[in-house]
């Protein structure tokens, strides 16, 4: 009789522990993979892992596509399942279906959303500096726009991380890898103003108030959506959109993509290419008219 300890649910927490300490997955990645495996259990059942077959994955894709789930969402679940099966095969030595045979659906490249300089100005002008939580939001926005950091990286920032003279900090970025981030004078100015108002000794730059805790991602979203509506910005507005805004502004200013890669902390330059080459179709049209007309 098969051991119930080899079902997905029974192995889930040990897999997440392995992902955290052996593979150095971030908390965000672990949460995504937990959600992915639970979604598989809901759709297909809590199968013993050696009984999972390629046709189960095909059935999973079929059911989710029929319900209208996006290719991105389905792909995320497939990647989580693949990582879990690799753990079962390579670490637990359980004979499971080859993870390489599990193909995520093809994801079409989405157009990169970013704010224009006018939209950034309107967004910032809606922030009331007389309110402490709003002042903190302004500082966070200035840091995101002045560094290009991911929101998780900005919220992990500590006071002692910042080298004020060199205008940089060493942080733990995506994939639990250490990298350097660079600050503008303006972003450092806002951090200094903010820290002078603080009357606590908490190590984190961004904290909640009474009791003092490090600010979390979920604490931030509502502020962005509220001020997006106040600024009458029709586009989606999140901390990651500000990261796109930094990247596109650098690119439009002529910054080489290799430098943008380092500023954003991309592990591979093809990631930078994939996101930001051809991001502005109007500028591409202008270039087409200018350069190809030279041939006439």
Image: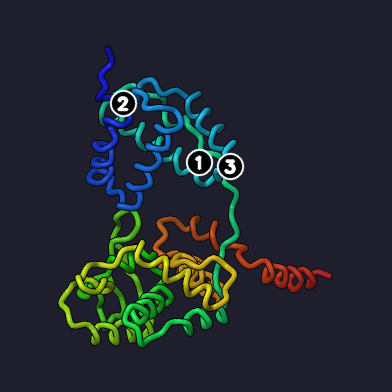
Q: Position of residue 164 (x, y in %)?
A: 26, 82
Mark 1 and 3 residues: CB-CB less than 8 Å, in contact?
no
In terms of secondary structure, where does tag 3 sit?
Answer: loop
Which corner quadrant holds the N terminus? top left
Residue 41 vs 80, above or below: the answer is above
Q: Which residue is at a point 37% across and 65% down the rendered structure image?
A: 151
Number of other residues with Cα within 10 Å of mark 3, as a class: few under 14, some 14 to 19, many 20 or more: few
Residues at marks 1 and 3, CA–CA distance in whole angstroms: 10 Å
Q: Which mark is residue 7?
A: 2
1 vs 3, front mark:
3
In terms of secondary structure, where does tag 2 sit?
Answer: loop
Q: Which residue is at a point 17% across and 79% down the rendered structure image?
A: 200
Of the numbered discs 1 and 3, the one sitting upstream in the chain is: 3
Q: Identify the image quadrant of residue 154.
A: bottom left
Residue 291 vs 131, above or below: the answer is above
Mark 2 and 3 residues: CB-CB less than 8 Å, in contact?
no
Residues at marks 1 and 2, CA–CA distance in whole angstroms: 22 Å
Q: Which residue is mark 1?
A: 74
Q: Position of residue 131 (x, y in %)?
A: 35, 83
Residues at marks 2 and 3, CA–CA distance in whole angstroms: 28 Å
Which residue extends farthest top? 1
Of the numbered discs 1 and 2, the one sitting upstream in the chain is: 2
Q: Identify the image quadrant of residue 105.
A: top right
In terms of secondary structure, where does tag 1 sit?
Answer: helix
Residue 260 in view in this figure: no
Of the numbered discs 2 and 3, the one sitting upstream in the chain is: 2
Q: Which residue is mark 3?
A: 68
Q: Position of residue 52 (x, y in %)?
A: 41, 24
């Amino acid at each position: 009789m098969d051991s119930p300890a080899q079902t997905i649910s029974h192995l889930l927490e040990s897999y997440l522990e392995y992902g955290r300490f052996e593979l150095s997955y971030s908390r965000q990645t672990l949460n995504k993979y937990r959600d992915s495996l639970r979604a598989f259990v809901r759709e297909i059942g809590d199968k013993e892992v050696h009984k999972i077959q390629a046709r189960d994955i095909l059935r999973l894709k079929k059911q989710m596509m029929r319900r209208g789930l996006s290719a991105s969402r389905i792909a995320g679940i497939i990647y989580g399942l693949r990582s879990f099966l690799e753990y079962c095969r390579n670490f637990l030595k359980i004979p499971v279906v080859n993870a390489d045979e599990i193909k995520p659906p093809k994801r079409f490249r989405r157009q990169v959303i970013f704010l224009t300089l006018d939209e950034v100005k309107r967004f910032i002008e809606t922030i009331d500096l007389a309110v402490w939580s709003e002042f903190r939001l302004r500082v966070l926005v200035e840091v995101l726009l002045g560094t290009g950091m991911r929101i998780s990286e900005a919220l992990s920032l500590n006071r002692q991380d910042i080298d004020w003279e060199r205008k940089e900090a060493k942080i733990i970025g995506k994939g639990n890898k250490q990298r350097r981030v660079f600050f503008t004078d303006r972003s450092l100015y806002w951090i200094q103003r903010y820290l002078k108002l603080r009357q606590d000794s908490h190590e984190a730059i961004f904290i909640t108030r009474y009791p003092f805790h490090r600010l979390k991602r979920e604490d931030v979203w509502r502020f962005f959506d509220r001020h997006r509506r106040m600024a009458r910005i029709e586009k989606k507005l999140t901390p990651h959109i500000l990261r796109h805004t930094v990247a596109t502004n650098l690119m439009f200013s002529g910054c080489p993509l290799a430098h943008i890669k380092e500023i954003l902390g991309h592990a591979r330059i093809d990631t930078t290419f994939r996101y930001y080459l051809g991001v502005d179709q109007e500028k591409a049209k202008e270039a087409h008219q200018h350069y190809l007309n030279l041939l006439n």
